[in-house]
Amino acid sequence: MARANISGGKTANARIIHSEGDGAYDKMLLAMSNGFAVAGQDLTQSRLSNDSMNIYLLVYDIKGGKMAVCFSHTDDARYNGYKQTGTAWMGVLKGAEWVTISRKDDRRWGWNR
């Protein structure tokens, strides 16, 4: 899990909050955590002093390789929608490269993208 700051409608300065697997996927998660676009700000509902978003990366061992899922979440009510709402990046490891298998392939997230 990483936490990224929200500034100017995008995430930046991500940092690892929780890591398993001896940090094998930390670099991948940090690359994915920066650059989310945020929409729908309502300052009257804020209860946090700093704008931030949590990004999760789950990696699974599957038959014949690995599969990964990346998605975001915020505890702050002021952001009522993200441009990534309802979606998650999904990919499989083919050789040394992560290949997107999400329905929307224009999201070029992943290890070597």
Image (cartoon, rainbow, N blue to C red):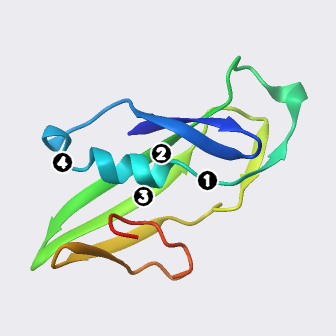
Crowd tier of the residue under label 2, counting other residues whose Cα lies within 10 Å: few below 14, some 14–19, many 20 or above = many
Quadrant in which the C terminus appears: bottom left
Pinpoint residue 53: horizontal percent, then vertical percent: 58, 38
**Amino acid type of the residue tagged 1 in the rendering:** Phe
Q: Which of marks 2 and 3 is nearer the N terminus?
A: 2
- Provide the residue designation for mark 1: 36
Of 87 and 22, nearer the camera is 22
Q: Which amino acid does label 3 sit on?
A: Cys
Which mark is first along the chain, 4 or 1? 4
Tell me whether circle 2 and circle 1 mark residues in contact (CB < 8 Å).
Answer: yes
The image quadrant that residue 104 belongs to is bottom right
Mark 1–mark 3 Cα distance, whole angstroms, equals: 12 Å
* Residues at marks 2 and 4 touching, judged by CB atoms closer than 8 Å: no
**Mark-to-mark CA distance, 2 and 1:** 10 Å
Dot 3 corresponds to which residue?
70
Q: Which amino acid does label 4 sit on?
A: Ala
Amino acid type at circle 2 is Ile
Estimate the spatial distance between the alpha carbons at disc 4 and disc 3, rounded to whole Å: 15 Å
Q: Do labels 4 and 3 touch, CB within 8 Å?
A: no
According to the picture, the residue beneath numbered tag 2 turns out to be 55
Q: How many numbered badges does the structure rendering display? A: 4
Q: Do the residues labelled 2 and 3 touch (CB within 8 Å)?
A: yes
Left or right of 66? Residue 4 is right
Q: Looking at the picture, how far across and down is residue 35, in whole percent?
A: 59, 52
Q: Tell me whether circle 1 and circle 4 mark residues in contact (CB < 8 Å).
A: no
Displayed quadrant of residue 15 = top left
Measured as percent of width and height from the top left, residue 101 is found at 39, 81
Whole-Å distance between the Cαs marked 2 and 3? 7 Å
Q: Name the residue under label 4.
A: 24
Residue 27 point in image, percent of width and height = 31, 48
